[in-house]
Amino acid sequence: MISFNYETNFKINNPEKATLWITNAISEEKCKLGEINYIFCSDNYLHKINVQFLNHDTLTDIISFDYSVGKELHGDIYISVDRVKENASEYDVKFEDELARVLIHGVLHYCGYKDKSDKEAKLMRSKEDYYLNKR
């Protein structure tokens, strides 16, 4: 089950379509959907989580807590709507496209993709682009 939760005034457009798209990506990655919670919030809200749980005193667009069991995906994905808006502007892309990238990015982490090294980040970006083209 995928649920969308809000700690800000933002609401995702067409959550049913987003759920189907994410579910199909999970299936294509040979994983099983468990329970994934997306929490949309502000920079300030996510910054507090970043400091408290990850000891990082920085702004970020996404933090994902992975509770997956094997290939069954479970987790909480926090997304700063403020940061997504700013990144969309910085990269000159539509807000909806940047939001979709972040939505799938969190799930790809649960599927086993990393992005710490240049090689890992390149593969992650390639997977993001692949699924963005399937929306």
Image: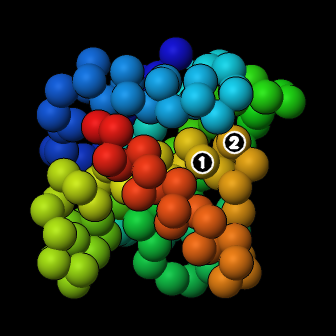
Number of dots carrying numbers: 2
Could you say which is closer to the camera, residue 46 or residue 23? 23
Horizontal side of residue 133 vs 46, given as left or right: left
Indicate the colouring scheme: rainbow
Q: Is residue 41 visible?
A: no
**Crowd band around label 2 with a 10 angstrom C-alpha radius: few (<14), some (14–19), many (20+):** many
Write down the quadrant of residue 42 in the picture. Answer: bottom left
Image x and y of residue 77, in percent: 52, 45
At 22% from the left and 83% from the top, the residue drawn is 90
Q: Residue at point 27% right, 19% down?
A: 16
The answer to whether 82 is drawn above or below residue 2 in the figure is below
Q: Residue at x 32, y 47 (%)?
A: 133
Q: Is residue 60 above or below residue 126?
A: below
Image quadrant where one finds the C terminus: top left
- Whether residue 63 sits left or right of residue 10 in the image: it is right
Find the residue positioned furthest to the right: 70
Q: Position of residue 4 (x, y in %)?
A: 37, 30
Q: In what element is the residue under mark 2? A: loop
Residue 64: % across, % down: 60, 51
Question: What residue is disc 1 on?
Answer: 108
Compare residues 58 and 25 and report the one nearer the observer: 25
* Placement of 116 over or under 103, stated as above or below: below
Distance CA(mark 1)–CA(mark 2): 5 Å
Q: Quadrant of residue 61?
A: bottom left
The amino acid on which the numbered mark 1 sits, given as a three-letter code, is Leu
Image coordinates of residue 55 in percent, x first then y, are 69, 76
Determine whether, in the image, residue 84 is placed left or right of residue 126.
left
Q: Which residue is mark 2?
A: 111
* Callout 1: SS: helix
User: Mark 1 near mark 2, Cβ–Cβ under 8 Å?
Assistant: yes
The three-letter code of the residue at mark 2 reads: Cys
